[in-house]
Image (spheres, grey):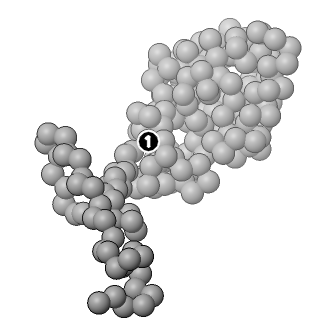
Amino acid sequence: MTVPNDPNQQPGGTPPPSPPPAAAPSPGYQPTESYSTPQGFPAAPPVQPEYGYGQVSAPPGMYVDQASGLALPNGTQLAPVGRRIGAWFLSIGLVIVTLVIGYLIWGIILWGRGQTPALKVLKMRVWRPADQQPASFGVMALREILGRLVDGIVSPITPVVSFVMMLAGKEHKTLHDVVASTVVLHDPNNVIPGA
């Protein structure tokens, strides 16, 4: 007997076909829950969050910055665009006052802490989101030498492109930040070790 307007029956009174069997899980996979789509087909389990770019949660002592989606240390924030611009102008002044050579020596000393002289004065740090650590000496050398070459010498248009990227990007990255995979954080209370 068929019931009129029964959504579980097809025309002619036959029941709907059963969904195909689920594919065998890969070795070592132990699902704890069953996930399925509205049509009854198996669905992929939700992706587990990871730390670094695009994460959903942060490890202890860190928080997720809502604007960028990055895990940052508690007590810090992405350096605002105005502070980044201020650091650029300050670095010009410091280069003049220290007669260039003093700035270079001071800068090389600070690279091991993930800073430049202007960033040090303005309480900012260069941070590697992928490592969740301040930039190392090697990363800072890459950022400040190769990154600055790409940023300013490759073409007369690259400084403009770099500036627009910093203004428009959610992580406020310039070209030299992209080269080194870094962001700049404002760390007013020196919560990041080694500041």
Quadrant, the N terminus? bottom left
- The residue that disc 1 covers is 52
Q: Is residue 110 above or below residue 164?
A: above
Q: Position of residue 69 (x, y in %)?
A: 54, 50
Which residue is drawn at the image coordinates 19% and 55% (left, top)?
31
Along the line of sight, which residue is nearer the eye, 86 or 95?
Answer: 86
Residue 94's spot in the image, x, y percent? 74, 23
Q: Is residue 59 visible?
A: no
| Rendered residue at 60%/21% (across/down) | 179
Q: Is residue 145 above or below residue 56?
A: above
Relative to 100, residue 15 above or below: below
Q: Position of residue 17 (x, y in %)?
A: 31, 65
Q: Is residue 189 left or right of residue 169?
A: left
Which amino acid type corresponds to the residue marked 1 in the rendered image? Gly
Q: Is residue 16 left or right of residue 143?
A: left
Quadrant housing residue 176: top right
Judging depth in this view, the residue of 114 and 11 nearest the camera is 11
Query: In this picture, is 9 found above or below 5?
Result: above
Q: Tag count in the figure?
A: 1
Q: Is residue 69 visible?
A: yes
Left/right placement of residue 110 relative to residue 160 reads left
Viewer-side residue, 88 vs 181: 181
Quadrant housing residue 104: top right
